[in-house]
Every structure is written in C-alpha cells, then in structure tokens.
Image (cartoon, grey):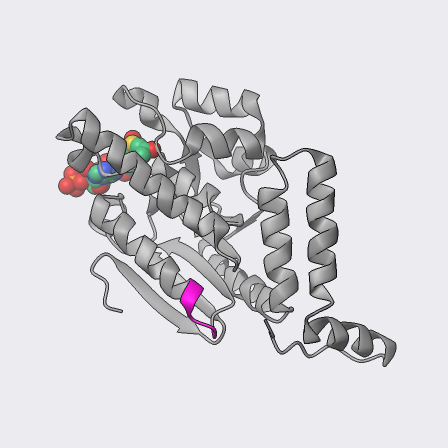
Amino acid sequence: MAYETILYAKDGAVATVTINRPKVLNALNPKVVAELGQAFAEVAADDEVKVAILTGAGGKAFVAGADIAAMSVMNPVEARNFSRQLQEVTSFMEALGKPIICAVDGFALGGGTEMALACDFIYASEASKFGQPEINLGVIPGAGGTQRLSRLVGKNWAKELCLTGDIIDVALAKEIGLVNRVFTSEELMPAALKTAKKIASKGRVSTKACKDLINFGFDVPLDHALRMEADAFGICFASPDQKEGMTAFLEKRKAEFKGSK
Ligand code: CAA
C-alpha cells in the first residue's frame, strides 16, 4: 500500500512503520493517524509479518505530539472525534495479535508518548525525552495518556507528568518503568530489530497469547485472568509449535518453530 506520511518496510518477519513528517517533528494529524491505522491493519493481515517496530524519521523526534496547527482550528466535536481516532488506532495496536516494539530516538511528547504506550515496550536512545505537555496548551492527553500511562508507571507519576507538563529525560523515563532499555542513537534500531527477530522466531500462538493475556488480563479480577491464562495455555497445545518446542527440548536441540496458527 502507498502511504504519504509514513514509511512501511519489511525485513523477513519484521515490519517497520516509520512516521515520516520530520519537518514538524512527526506531529500526528488526522492523515498520519489514519495511515498508521492502515499500516497496522497491513501488519495484522500479512501472514509473513510476526512482529512490528514503530519509529519516527529524522533523528530529532519520535513524535512531538498531536499536530498543534491542525488542532488549533478544531471545534469541540472535531477535537472529540480526533481523540477517538487516536484512541481507536492505539487500541487496535494494543489488540493486534503481533507484538509492536517502539523505538524512540528524540522527543516523544503528548501523542508521541501515548503512541509509544500503545506498543508492547519501548526502546529509546540516550537523547530521548518524554512527557505529557498538553496541560501547557490548556488541554489534556487525548490518545490514552491519562489511562495507559497510569497503568504502566502508576497513578502518582502519571499525575506528576500530566499535571506539570514536564518533559523528562530518558534516565528518569527508565527509572519509572516507561522505557525498557536505553541505547545510543546508532545502536537503537539494530537493537530493536534484533529483539523483534528473536520474538519472531518463537511460536505464533504462544506469542499472541502472551501479549493478549498481559494486556487484557491486567484489568480483570485475578481469578478471571488466571482462568483466561489456563484456557490460553491449553490452546497452545493445539499448535504444532508446542509439539516442536517440547520435542526439541527432549531431543536436546534448538526448537525450529514454523509459526503455525
Ligand atoms: N504540532 C505541530 N507542529 C509541531 C509540533 C506539534 N506537536 N511540535 C513541533 N512542531 C513543529 C514546530 O512548529 C516547528 O515548525 P516550524 O519549523 O515550521 O516552525 C518544527 O516542528 C520544529 O519544532 P521547534 O522549532 O519547536 O523545535 P525545538 O527544538 O525548538 O523544540 C519541542 C522541540 C520542544 C519538541 C517543541 O517543538 C515542542 O514543544 N513541541 C510541541 C510539544 C507538545 O506540546 N506536544 C503535545 C501536543 S498536544 C497532544 O499531543 C494532544 C494529544 O494527546 C492528542
């Protein structure tokens, strides 16, 4: 599919989606958000793709937020619809049965932090900065920031970030659990690709089950979530990859998963 505001590339089982508006630090307007939805639908539909990486072009920003020029002329209904559009795409990413690694090199602000939060985990460069500065514009996060940030880093840090609008460096982002690992700018994409390929080499059914259970078991009572886990554990046994994984262990060799469904 041809895109105007993003780049889509495949390397074996890994698709890389790059937000490509570097002149405005990859700010998210409705066109970018729509194309991100299409790109992740392409990831979902392509059987060859098992893992995706989301990143931003230009080396200065992952995403410096929703596009303030576009938002400045929105009326309340348009703003509400834009927020829903962002939320629908981020929820689609979260529900996608294939992991998404976010590679942040530079600013991830407002909608940028929120887009990263919808991915499964974040790798960042040493120069990266995070924050929810919407309060400085007289608004609030509108792409899930008040909800996903608090679920990941706790209510207290989410409140400090959303209420002050402060921009934090990568060391603090790592300390509070927003970022998994930190690399130099040069090391970032190779590291994301290496991890993506490692995940892509695992069984497809077990990979999807892990992502779904950790995401969707989190907000239901533990007893229910544990039953969901037991059901998914059982479903793994319908996959040839379970036979291969256990047989390989018993035969003292490395498993060769076929990625069966
Ligand atoms: N929207 C639109 N344009 C943006 C933008 C944004 N979020 N962020 C940066 N740009 C544009 C700038 O206007 C500038 O364009 P021009 O060259 O045409 O003037 C260009 O990108 C480069 O930016 P700066 O000159 O500002 O670069 P800097 O290095 O001086 O500052 C920055 C970098 C600190 C990230 C600064 O650009 C900034 O504060 N950006 C806005 C951050 C922000 O408030 N994000 C939250 C948006 S609201 C939101 O995201 C709502 C939501 O949850 C849905």
The quarter in which the C terminus is drawn is: bottom right
- Say whether residue 110 is visible: yes
Q: Does the magenta stretch include residue 45?
A: yes
Residue, x 69% and y 56% (percent of image)? Answer: 232
Tell how many labels: 0
Q: Position of residue 72 (x, y in %)?
A: 16, 29
Residue, x 33% and y 21% (percent of image)? Answer: 135
Residue, x 46% and y 52% (percent of image)? Answer: 102
Q: Is residue 189 magenta?
A: no
Q: Which is nearer the eye, 25 or 88? A: 88
Give the magenta part as a residue range: 44-48
Query: In this picture, is 164 found above or below 10?
Result: above
Q: Where is residue 215 in the image (x, y as percent from the top left)?
A: 58, 44
- Is 215 displayed left or right of 93 in the figure? right
* Image quadrant assignment for residue 246: bottom right
- Say whether residue 64 is visible: no
Query: In this picture, is 222 found above or below 50?
Result: above
- Is 110 displayed left or right of 125 in the figure? left
Query: In this picture, is 129 found above or below 194?
Result: above
Q: Which is nearer the eye, 62 or 248? A: 248
Q: Position of residue 195 (x, y in %)?
A: 58, 62
